[in-house]
């Protein structure tokens, strides 16, 4: 996947937000994706539908809400929307401090999810993300690792 596919822009990061529920947190992610022009309005209900069938909490206080497979048709372009909740949100018994909304098309979808899961699997990075006080820190933490990306590209070429 090209590094640009996961490029996070400052407008896609919201810090210090509050949500009374998981549904409200998902709405905030979906509305941000809509504001960014990444999705059609119908994508937002599909994010809730996905959550009902496959919970998106991935651990370390992070959830990655995204639409259903059928909702890919409503994605205009690949984008991430990061919403930080310092006070936490009850996500089916887990304490979520960061929700990363994802809009992706075709095969990008699984690659974006995989890349995020890999990045967030490092507890120190996840902690810095949960407590980030500025947008630049969030962007730096979620940038694809160029060395890992080059390795992934080389592996794909040999297949």
Image: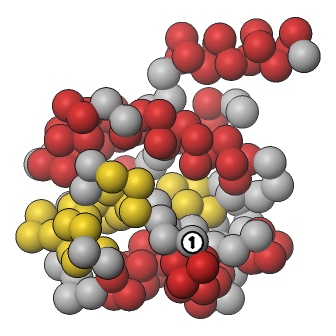
Which quadrant would residue 42 be assigned to in this image?
A: bottom right
The percent coordinates of residue 116 (x first, y second) are 48, 42
Which quadrant holds the N terminus? top right
Residue drawn at 20 percent across, 66 percent down: 95
Q: Is residue 134 something that shows in the picture?
A: no
Q: For this rendering, which residue is in front, 138 or 20? A: 20
- Can you tell which quarter of the image residue 127 is in? top left
Residue matched to label 1: 54
What residue is at 9 percent from the left and 70 percent from the top? Answer: 87
Q: How is the image coloured?
A: secondary structure
From the viewer's perspective, is 136 left or right of 87?
A: right
Instruction: Please tell me which residue is depicted at 52% across the width and 78% down the height of the picture.
Output: 51
Q: Could you tell whether 155 is left or right of 110 in the image?
A: right
Return the x and y of residue 134 as percentages of the image width and height. 17, 47
Which residue is found at the position 57% from the left and 71% from the top?
54
Quadrant hosting residue 120? top left
Image height of 81 relative to 136, above or below: below
Closer-to-camera residue (13/55): 55
- Percent of width and height locating residue 66: 57, 68
> Total label count?
1
Q: Tell me residue 50's x, y (percent).
A: 60, 77
Crowdedness near tag 1: few (<14), some (14–19) or many (≥20) residues, C-alpha within 10 Å: few
| Disc 1, SS | loop
Q: Is residue 26 left or right of residue 19?
A: right
Say if residue 111 shows up in the picture: yes
Nearer the observer, 34 or 106: 106
């Amino acid at each position: 996947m090209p590094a640009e596919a996961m490029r996070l822009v400052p407008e896609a990061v919201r810090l210090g937000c509050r949500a009374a529920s998981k549904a409200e947190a998902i709405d905030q992610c979906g509305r941000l994706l809509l504001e960014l022009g990444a999705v059609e309005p119908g994508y937002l209900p599909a994010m809730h539908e996905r959550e009902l069938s496959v919970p998106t909490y991935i651990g370390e206080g992070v959830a990655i809400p995204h639409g259903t497979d059928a909702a890919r048709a409503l994605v205009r372009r690949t984008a991430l929307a990061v919403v930080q909740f310092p006070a936490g949100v009850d996500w089916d018994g887990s304490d979520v401090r960061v929700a990363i909304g994802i809009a992706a098309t075709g095969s990008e979808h699984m690659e974006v999810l995989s890349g995020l899961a890999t990045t967030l699997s490092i507890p120190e990075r996840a902690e810095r993300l949960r407590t980030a006080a500025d947008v630049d820190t969030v962007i730096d933490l979620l940038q694809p690792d160029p060395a890992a990306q080059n390795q992934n590209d080389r592996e794909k070429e040999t297949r």
